[in-house]
DNA sequence: TGAATAACCGACCGATAGGTTGGTAAAACT
DNA sequence: AGTTTTACCAACCTATCGGTCGGTTATTCA
């Protein structure tokens, strides 16, 4: 048994750390909705009292802010990596879809929360602004892919981008990490989005 | 001037009717979220007081119930009409997607609310149950279309159905009725979903 | 052993929520 | 004119919310 500790051994009375608190909170936020979840609910799920919860976090909004930040950061990291890729815009778009699915799967709970934000507070408005930023990025990529002839040009780029990521984002509604490797799902999404649902030609081609 | 009245002339003091109340409520529910919207907010938007609002409706939940019912009814009507259609399952699936987009566009606010329900109350759980019913219906149609060779069989039917309607449903996030006829959008969605984003024809496509 | 540190709790607070009560104002019907 | 019907309102009630306060318990470091 290795007794090596990743955390260098904390001072004071042992208990929950911020990550555990955040995880519990986000799980509840997603299950019941942010507004429908009270700080008492979060505390109860952790087995602590509400006042102890406030020892860990400054308030309910901080939990939301941390969650949406992790989601948004993940998406932008994926976007940055894809932008560095060389190759056609079509391939970059394809890879952005693939890596977005992986980010969604990996940070499922955080992204789920992000996608439900309505803009009621400054924290939420900031999250919405960053989402729009990401959307603009996708739209630009679609436009380039159309210009180079890689994807169909008979659809408005913004509309295509929205429908494409509407499909991608929808998986927070049903994807559960326990069943199936996310890579396979990412592949399915890319295939469906780019090649469509219809059988191609007369060849009943089956891939992998 | 015709003085014909569609409503046969109401008794008593004139004022708001249930439909107007519902419309105002649903608009706010969608803008700020159901839980984040108070009955005071709804009353204020109508220019009446909270107690007057309770003269029109029995409670907040009734508003939610009426809204999700209108959404769900619309979707099932579309599904029923499509089922009566003769032709391949592939065509029926295609038409279900098309008419679903039209229902979403026509009853946008109601469907938007439906798609955000979390299952916190019995009303919400009932709505979720009917959504699952609809999903099962779509999945079955996908399975049939795969069996007859109309759409690709290398994707799990349930997954395909979810991704397909994930794309369809996502338009409540951005579609606004003022710009553009919904028929054109429905066409775009069907085309993208079935034929994919990629350019058809003599593409220098190299399968990864 | 004792200071420092950190997790913890019970009791409380002001604001706001959904909902109720009892009564008034304006229209249609007779 | 008077009855009925309907829309309307001010004031109020109780529960719950996010958040605070003062003090306690468990652990590490010197």
Image (cartoon, coloured by chain):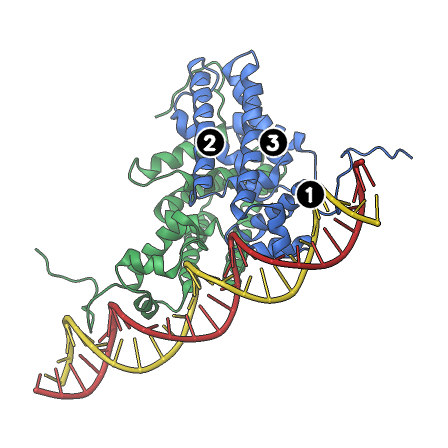
Chain colours: A green, B blue, C red, D yellow
Disc 3 with disc 2 on a shared chain? yes
Do circles 2 and 1 both sit on a common chain?
A: yes
Q: Which mark is residue B103?
A: 3
Residue B207 visible, this orientation: no
- Circle nearer the viewer, 3 or 2: 2
**Where, quadrant-wise, is the C terminus of chain A in this rendering?**
top left
Task: Please state the chain letter of the residue tagged with numbered disc 3 in the rendered image.
Answer: B
Residue A167 locus on image (x, y percent):
49, 37
Say which label, 2 or 1, has the lower sequence index.
1
Label 1 marks a residue whose chain is B
Q: CA distance from mark 3 to mark 1?
A: 24 Å
**Label ID, residue B17:** 1
- Residue A115 is situated, as x and y percent measured from the top left of the image, at 48, 48
The residue nearer to you, when weighing B19 against B86, is B19
Badge number at residue B130: 2
A80 or A178: nearer the viewer: A178
Disc nearest the viewer among 2 and 1: 1
């Amino acid at each position: 048994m290795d007794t090596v500790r990743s955390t260098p051994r904390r001072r004071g009375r042992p208990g929950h750390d911020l990550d555990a608190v955040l995880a519990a909170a986000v799980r509840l936020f997603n299950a019941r909705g942010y507004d429908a979840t009270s700080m008492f609910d979060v505390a109860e799920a952790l087995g602590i009292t509400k006042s102890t919860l406030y020892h860990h976090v400054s308030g309910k909004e901080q939990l939301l802010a941390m969650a949406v930040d992790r989601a948004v950061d993940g998406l932008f990291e994926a976007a940055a990596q894809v932008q560095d890729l060389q190759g056609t815009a079509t391939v970059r778009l394809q890879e952005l879809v693939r890596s977005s699915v992986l980010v969604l799967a990996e940070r499922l709970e955080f992204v789920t929360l992000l996608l439900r934000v309505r803009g009621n507070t400054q924290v939420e408005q900031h999250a919405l602004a960053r989402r729009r930023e990401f959307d603009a990025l996708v739209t630009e990529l679609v436009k380039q892919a159309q210009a180079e002839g890689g994807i169909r040009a008979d659809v408005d780029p913004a509309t295509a981008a929205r429908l494409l990521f509407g499909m991608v984002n929808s998986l927070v509604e049903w994807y559960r990490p326990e069943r199936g490797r996310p890579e396979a799902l990412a592949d399915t999404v890319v295939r469906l989005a780019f090649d469509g649902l219809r059988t191609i030609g007369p060849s009943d081609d089956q891939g992998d």
